[in-house]
Amino acid sequence: DTGVSQNPRHKITKRGQNVTFRCDPISEHNRLYWYRQTLGQGPEFLTYFQNEAQLEKSRLLSDRFSAERPKGSFSTLEIQRTEQGDSAMYLCASSTSTDTQYFGPGTRLTVL
Amino acid sequence: DAKTTQPTSMDCAEGRAANLPCNHSTISGNEYVYWYRQIHSQGPQYIIHGLKNNETNEMASLIITEDRKSSTLILPHATLRDTAVYYCIVRGPYLIQGAQKLVFGQGTRLTINP
């Protein structure tokens, strides 16, 4: 399978814990995006990278959130001191510079 | 905010064509119309996109009106597996700052009935 992959698919954590998600984009896609989707809503943009550079961040990305793409390939999204309001599906997408975004299956986070 | 308006829900009989409308009356001349769908608990799946001309691929057809203020996604022979939320998204070209992100609205929940 050469699509976007995300790990883990599900994560249950207690409030106050830190969690980290990983996204592996389609090979040779230089752009990588993170979105968040809460129940009953459409996905909302969080941030995107071109190669290793983080070029845009949404206001939704509070200081407890940090995303990295150190070598311009896979990316990680970390949430520190999780809150119940962080419970959502976290989606990753990738694209070439001028092409369509393709999404992964998502990581569903539940904060107890 | 999303720049599109879609019906909240639609039903279609299996084997019939499903026609999903989308209004985007404020679309700019260089903005594209994209369609994605999301089957329950999965990531959004790209379907098709277009600028001015009608487009067709193996999944669907996209009909854009001449004034570009609305469009219709057509699934020619709907199956039960086409049951999903369908999102119509307007986005600018990649070179414009801020145009890279997709802005999703509520979408249309399409139910295909046997």
Image (spheres, coloured by chain):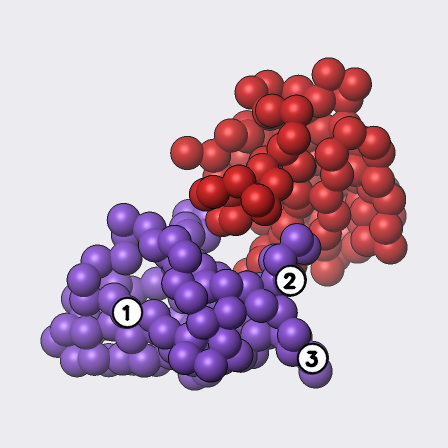
Image coordinates for residue B64, horizontal then vertical, percent: 77, 28
Evaluate whether residue A68 shows in this view: yes
Instruction: Choose between A2 and A27: the one closer to the eye.
Output: A27
Q: Residue at x 65, y 30 (%)?
A: B30
Instruction: Choose between B90 and B40: the one closer to the eye.
Output: B90
Mark 2 lies on a secondary structure that is loop
Q: Which residue is mark 1?
A: A66
The purple one among the chains is A
Q: Earlier in the sequence, mark 2 or mark 1?
A: 1
Q: Chain of mark 2?
A: A
Q: Earlier in the sequence, mark 3 or mark 2?
A: 3
Mark 3 lies on a secondary structure that is loop
Image coordinates for residue A75, horizontal then vertical, percent: 44, 76
* Mark 1 crowdedness (10 Å alpha carbons): few <14, some 14-19, many ≥20: some
Mark 1 lies on a secondary structure that is strand
The red one among the chains is B
Q: Which residue is mark 2?
A: A96
Evaluate whether residue B41 shows in this view: no
Residue type indicated by callout 3: Thr
Q: Chain of mark 3?
A: A
Q: Which residue is mark 3?
A: A2
Relative side of B24 to A91, left or right: right
Callout in the foreground (3, 1): 1
Residue type indicated by callout 2: Thr
Tell me how far mark 3 sits from mark 2, CA to CA.
14 Å
Q: Are marks 3 and 2 on the same chain?
A: yes
